[in-house]
Amino acid sequence: MTTAAIKEQFDGYLPVLTNKQQELLLKIVKNFLNVDKDEKRITRKQYNKEIIDAVARIEKGNSVKNEVALKELSKW
């Protein structure tokens, strides 16, 4: 697929997205290209701590079932 064809398709889809979806897509593109240097990434140590904390919450029963999460997400 040529660059022009990709751009044409992308330009066709962008107007049908909501403003929120367009913002999200822009964040995805920026993240993919690592353009937004102001956004600080977490360290591996912080990442591991967040995983450990999440597992602890799940083990305590402080979690949401997949069906409930999908229902909430569908409202967005």
Image (cartoon, rainbow, N blue to C red):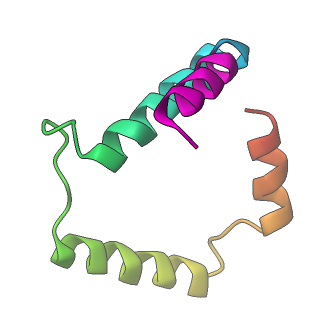
Residue lying at the far bottom of the rendered structure = 59
Seen in the image, is 50 located left or right of residue 57?
A: left
Residue 27 x/y as whole percent: 41, 35
Residue under the image location 65 percent in, 27 percent down = 9
Residue 12 x/y as whole percent: 68, 18
Task: Please determine whether, in this image, residue 29 is positioned above or below residue 12.
Answer: below
Seen in the image, is 8 located left or right of residue 40?
A: right
Q: Nearer the viewer, residue 6 or 39?
A: 6
Q: Quadrant of residue 19?
A: top right
Q: Quadrant of the C terminus?
A: top right
Residue 34 x/y as whole percent: 24, 46
Task: Please determine whether, in this image, residue 18 is positioned above or below residue 59.
Answer: above
User: Is residue 13 in the magenta section?
Assistant: yes
Q: Nearer the viewer, residue 51 or 2?
A: 2
Residue under the image location 20 percent in, 55 percent down = 41
Q: Nearer the viewer, residue 65 or 2?
A: 2
Q: Nearer the viewer, residue 72 or 40?
A: 40
Residue under the image location 20 percent in, 61 percent down = 42
Residue lying at the far front of the rendered structure = 2
Q: Quadrant of residue 15?
A: top right
Seen in the image, is 1 located left or right of residue 36?
A: right
Task: Please determine whether, in this image, residue 15 is positioned above or below residue 9.
Answer: above
Seen in the image, is 27 located left or right of residue 65?
A: left
Q: Main secondary structure of the magenta part?
A: helix
Give the magenta-colored segment's residue range.
1-14
Q: Quadrant of the N terminus?
A: top right
Q: How many marks?
A: 0
Residue under the image location 51 percent in, 33 percent down = 25
Residue 6 x/y as whole percent: 56, 33
